[in-house]
Image (cartoon, rainbow, N blue to C red):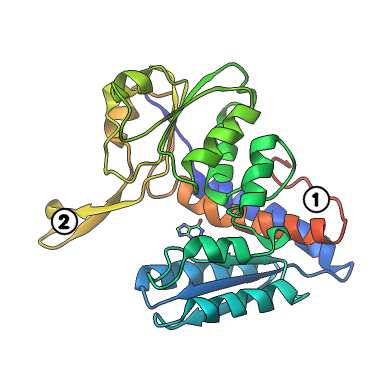
Amino acid sequence: MSATIIDGKAHAQGLRARIADAAASLSSRGVTPGLAVVIVGEDPASQLYVKNKARQTVEVGMRSFEHVLPASTTEAELLALVAGLNADPAVDGILVQLPLPKQIDAQKIIEAIDPAKDVDGFHPINAGKLMTGVPGLVSCTPLGCLLLIQSVRRDLAGLNAVVVGRSNIVGKPMAQLLIAQSCTVTVAHSRTRELPGVCREADILVAAVGRPEMVRGDWVKPGAIVIDVGINRVPNPAAGEGKTKVVGDVAYGEAAQVASAITPVPGGVGPMTIACLLRNTLEAACLRRGLPMPAVDFAA
Ligand code: GUN
């Protein structure tokens, strides 16, 4: 069997187009959603990521506010900025790029963000809402994964899902989203016994461990849907000395022989994360004003 390749780039583009339509209709009613992105430090990869977010925010017709702070920023300074953004009526969504420098307690910052503007879905209020089935803002990467899974199979009820990774950002919210879809969910991690055997039970396998190509082809159940969240930079000597390439947490070539559908890296989950951030900004803008959220996720 050769798997369907789930084109995250194309799905993200489609989602952004629908978000742009919804944003235009909001704008015509005098509401232009605004997203504030805060980055602390000069990490070039993070800066590029933030630049991409800002460009795409403007492209869908929303306002982008960027705050680039020096690596020496104190926790008190960042808390003051967050308080200002919480109070700013032009700001519907706030994203503070992680990781933060070690002098800043990231959890304190996450908890300082107004849950109604928490487009990352990291605030305990939003994590709790997800867990209890109450509508709220949902973490972007798992939301993107769910949309990609549903692009190949809408009804997931009764399927076995295995999520490899238990982070607050991906693994745990992913598990909650799949439970809400009536999957039977196993959350596996670095201490899981017989991990290959656990993965082989999965009709839906989500790999979010941050270990290059850890999930091998023979860990995949024939016909499974495989979602690879990993972004790992590894040496690529075939391309020349000192060259690198990006690979996922799944050995793609092997897994694609066994799965029914699989996301590539790059071009799978990654593009969906930013599209879902824009979707969440739209949702936050609507929720704050008591407006209905336009159905952007699966519109034709
Ligand atoms: N760093 C890596 N991924 C993310 C994300 O989704 N949100 C935030 N805030 N920081 C990140």
Residue 1 seen: no
Kind of residue indicated by mark 1? Met
In-image side of 251 versus 155 (left or right): left
Residue that extends furthest to the left in the rendered view of this protein = 241
Q: At which x and y percent is residue 114? A: 69, 63
Q: Is residue 26 above or below residue 127?
A: below
Between residues 239 and 276, which one lies in front from this camera angle? 276
In-image side of 273 versus 228 (left or right): right
Q: Quadrant of residue 19?
A: bottom right
Which residue position is annotated with label 1?
293
C-alpha span from label 1 to label 2? 47 Å
Q: Is residue 93 above or below residue 12?
A: below
In-image side of 242 versus 171 (left or right): left
Q: Earlier in the sequence, mark 1 or mark 2?
A: 2
**The C terminus, quarter of image:** top right
Q: At which x and y percent is residue 266? A: 38, 50
Q: Quadrant of residue 16?
A: bottom right
Tag 1, which secondary structure? Answer: loop
Badge nearest the viewer, 1 or 2: 1
Kind of residue indicated by mark 2? Ala
Give the numbered dot on residue 239.
2
